[in-house]
Image (cartoon, rainbow, N blue to C red):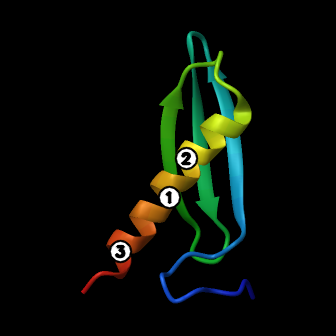
């Protein structure tokens, strides 16, 4: 089981890059909850930058789900 923190965020995520012509779709998936968040970005941006933005969006989605 993946360890969970109090904010509902696990430390293990999968990042997937799908080039789609003039842009790239980047998905971040939380392993523990199987929650996915996707962004569309510039293929000229680094994978690190794109992954950071996708992970930040995933964290936002997870925090929103955990609010009462």
Question: Is the C-beta separation of discs 2 and 1 under 8 Å?
Answer: yes
Instruction: Name the image quarter holding the N terminus.
Output: bottom right
Helix, strand or loop at mark 1: helix
Q: CA distance from mark 2 to mark 3?
A: 17 Å
Label 3, label 1: how many angstroms apart (C-alpha)?
11 Å
For disc 2, the marked residue is 54
**Residue 7 vs residue 31, the one in the foreground:** 7
Please identify the quarter of the rendering in which residue 50 is found. top right
Nearer to us of marks 2 and 3 is 2
Query: Residue 32: where, in percent of width, then height?
Result: 64, 77
If the image is split into quadrants, where does the C terminus sit?
bottom left
The residue pinned by badge 3 equals 65
> Which residue is at 41% across, 62% downward?
60
Q: State whether residue 36 is above or below residue 47.
A: below
The residues bearing labels 2 and 1 have C-alpha atoms spaced at a distance of 6 Å
Q: Position of residue 2 (x, y in %)?
A: 73, 83
Q: Position of residue 4 (x, y in %)?
A: 62, 86
Residue 54 lies, in percent from the top left, at 55, 46
Name which residue lies at 51% across and 54% down. 56
Check disc 1 and report the residue beneath it.
Answer: 58
Crowding around mark 2 (Cα neighbors within 10 Å: few <14, some 14 to 19, many 20+) is: many
3 or 1: tag closer to the N-terminus: 1
Quarter of the view holding residue 19? top right
Vertical arrangement, residue 42 with respect to residue 59, above or below: above
Helix or strand or loop: what does disc 3 sit on?
helix
């Amino acid at each position: 089981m993946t360890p969970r923190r109090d904010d509902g965020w696990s430390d293990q995520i999968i990042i997937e890059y799908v080039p789609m012509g003039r842009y790239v779709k980047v998905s971040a998936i939380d392993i523990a909850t199987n929650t996915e968040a996707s962004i569309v970005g510039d293929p000229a941006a680094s994978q690190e930058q794109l992954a950071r933005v996708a992970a930040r969006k995933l964290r936002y989605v997870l925090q929103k789900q955990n609010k009462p």
